[in-house]
């Protein structure tokens, strides 16, 4: 009893962690299910069918490719535009700073459905055809603020003396930027880009409003919740999870090895 | 636009008189800001205009300054508004109650497990959130283990008495929706909490102990006040998206648990009643912005923004 009381916080924390992890485990387990009906909600029996044929459902892999494409372009666009804004905000003084700051903050403080609905009214009023381009425009828009925030934090904590040193050593402005500034800012830019990719790839609400008849992967999952959920969805979800975990673990190992090499 | 007289940032000596250099910040800002103005600010104007239009899809809509739409929309859909705020508020509170211990454990008790725990907190993100939300259908299924346990412990008797569940079901009830919302936004609570907890100087805890503060007092007087920035940004990051969410209400709820997001979505994409949808979206935006502003003022962390 005393042990429980002393470790109450740890127990509560681990219970929360379980609450967060259990759905992932369910997704994983049910990727080996062989459901009886159209819906994959109740366990029937073990099967590897879905894993053998992950693209066996019409439009599934097409939607996945489309989502990856949109995410890649949205990441590129948001990262370039966002990094430029972040540098301007940290390094320069200019007019209308307050207005620009709130323009960047507001998209993050707005319920997604409001942005989605208002963007749709714009597209409808302009007679734009809904599809790949409208989705891409929307994704760059809502990823932008997150990239700015991530890059800004990094550039702000940068030691200005490093750039002064580069200039003292007769590096030109371009050379200083490419050889000194950019490498130091890189982790912030990378963090912003990763965040943008994740946000874009997994976005549903804004995409749902502005995609027209274009089907991204989240839209496919949404549709299948109405029509019937193929096991392949779980296969893709599990594969994404495993790949991402492997990438993170590999990254951790590389950085800890580098640290060790640096200290010894 | 002209350049202010304010001195340039110390680390970048700008030669006076060089107009090209003085324009650099504007060139850097221009593309991104234009993007935000055209695709974020301008749509708000279009939405405002749409909300006061009348007409039909066939004959087209026209601005008639028909403000009645707002009143009609609010009168018809106020239960959905109340529900949205109630569900989002409950989910935010639950996220705080569930997330705080975990953030605390990662910050102070995890030791060498800290990185692993952090990865585990972010890990759910690696699977698309719609797939994970659908998994809750399996977890909360009628007659499933979770419902059985809750039934045996008579939890469901209590929750159905206060109207959160119905009979032996959890799925398609308010509890399922709140449970899904809480689940979906927990990482957004935990990460800011962890960041502000991790910054706390460990010596402050020692000092509190040296002054004979009990662990509870230490938490109440030292740890919790110092973690307030995390609490504020965590609650905002949870409440704002949760108030506009319609995914959880659609996938885990029933027609009796529809939130205002569901109404906006169906008015816009199925009913095609654009004025009503735009008005609803505007009311939601106003409510959220007012609540957030008041909350930030109250919490006294205005520099957060």
Image (cartoon, coloured by chain):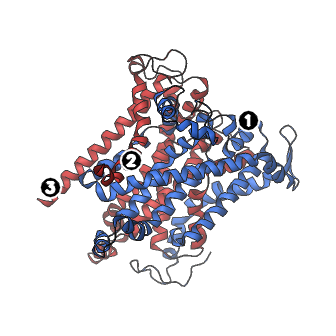
Chain colours: A red, B blue
Secondary structure beneath label 3: helix
Q: Furthest residue to the left?
A: A264
**Which of pointers 1 and 2 lies earlier in the amino acid sequence?**
2
Q: Residue at 44% across / 43% down in the picture?
A: B125
Residue A46 horizontal/vertical position (percent): 38, 17
Mark 3, mark 2: which one is toward the viewer? 2
Mark 3, mark 1: which one is toward the viewer? 1
Secondary structure beneath label 1: helix
Q: Say which quarter of the image contains residue A106.
A: bottom right
Secondary structure beneath label 2: helix
Q: Dot 1, crowdedness within 10 Å: few (<14), some or many (≥20)? A: few
Q: Residue at 86% across / 53% down in the picture?
A: B68
Above-or-below relation of B272 to A43: below
Q: Which of the two residues, B16 or B246, is positioned nearer the viewer here?
A: B246
Q: Which of the two residues, B42 or B222, is positioned nearer the viewer here?
A: B222
Q: Which residue is mark 3?
A: A261
Q: Which residue is mark 1?
A: B270
- Check whether the beta carbons of the residues at disc 1 and disc 2 lie within 8 A of each other: no
Q: Is residue A190 left or right of residue A84?
A: left
Query: Does the rendering let one see residue B97?
Result: yes
Q: Which residue is mark 2?
A: B121
Alpha-carbon span between mark 1 and mark 2: 37 Å
């Amino acid at each position: 009893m005393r042990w429980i009381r002393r470790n109450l916080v740890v127990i509560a924390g681990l219970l929360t962690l379980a609450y967060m992890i259990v759905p992932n485990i369910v997704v994983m387990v049910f990727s080996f299910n062989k459901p009886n009906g159209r819906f994959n909600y109740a366990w029937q029996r073990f099967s590897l069918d879905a894993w053998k044929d992950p693209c066996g459902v019409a439009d599934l892999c097409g939607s996945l490719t489309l989502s990856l494409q949109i995410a890649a372009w949205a990441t590129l666009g948001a990262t370039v535009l966002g990094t430029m804004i972040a540098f301007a905000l940290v390094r320069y003084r200019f007019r209308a700073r307050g207005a620009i700051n709130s323009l960047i903050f507001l998209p993050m403080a707005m319920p997604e459905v409001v942005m989605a609905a208002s963007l749709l009214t714009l597209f409808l009023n302009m007679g734009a055809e809904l599809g790949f381009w409208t989705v891409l425009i929307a994704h760059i828009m809502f990823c932008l603020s997150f990239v700015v925030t991530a890059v800004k934090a990094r550039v702000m904590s940068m030691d200005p003396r490093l750039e002064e040193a580069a200039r003292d050593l007769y590096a030109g402005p371009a050379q200083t930027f490419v050889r000194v500034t950019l490498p130091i800012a890189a982790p912030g830019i990378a963090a912003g880009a990763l965040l943008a990719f994740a946000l874009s790839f997994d976005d549903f609400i804004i995409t749902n409003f502005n995609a027209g008849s274009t089907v991204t992967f989240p839209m496919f999952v949404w549709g299948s919740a109405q029509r019937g959920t193929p096991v392949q969805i779980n296969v893709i979800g599990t594969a994404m999870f495993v790949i991402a975990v492997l990438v993170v673990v590999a990254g951790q190992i590389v950085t800890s090895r580098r640290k060790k090499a640096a200290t010894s | 636009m002209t350049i202010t007289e304010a001195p340039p940032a110390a680390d970048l000596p700008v030669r006076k008189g060089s107009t090209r250099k003085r324009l650099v910040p504007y060139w850097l800002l221009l593309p991104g800001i234009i993007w935000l103005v055209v695709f974020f600010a301008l749509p708000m104007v279009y939405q405002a205009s749409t909300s006061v239009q009348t007409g039909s899809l066939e004959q087209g809509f026209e601005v008639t300054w028909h403000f009645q739409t707002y009143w009609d929309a609010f009168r018809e859909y106020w239960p959905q508004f109340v529900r949205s705020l109630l569900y989002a508020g409950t989910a935010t509170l639950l996220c705080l109650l569930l997330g705080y211990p975990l953030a605390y454990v990662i910050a102070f008790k995890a030791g060498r497990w800290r990185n692993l725990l952090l990865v585990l907190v972010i890990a759910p993100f690696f699977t698309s959130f719609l797939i994970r939300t659908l998994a809750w259908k399996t977890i909360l299924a009628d007659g499933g283990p979770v419902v059985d346990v809750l039934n045996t412990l008579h939890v469901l008797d209590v929750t159905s008495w206060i109207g959160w569940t119905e009979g032996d079901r959890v799925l398609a009830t308010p509890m399922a929706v709140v449970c899904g919302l809480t689940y979906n936004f927990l990482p957004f609570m935990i990460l800011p909490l962890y960041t502000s907890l991790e910054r706390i100087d460990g010596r402050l805890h020692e000092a509190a102990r040296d002054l004979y503060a009990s662990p509870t007092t230490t938490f109440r007087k030292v740890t919790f006040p110092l973690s307030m920035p995390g609490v504020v940004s965590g609650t905002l990051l949870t409440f704002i998206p949760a108030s506009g969410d319609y995914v959880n209400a659609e996938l885990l709820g029933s027609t009796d648990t529809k939130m205002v997001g569901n109404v906006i979505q169906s008015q816009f994409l199925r009913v095609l009643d654009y004025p009503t949808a735009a008005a609803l979206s505007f009311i939601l935006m106003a409510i959220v912005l007012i609540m957030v502003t008041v909350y930030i003022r109250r919490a006294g962390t205005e520099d957060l923004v």
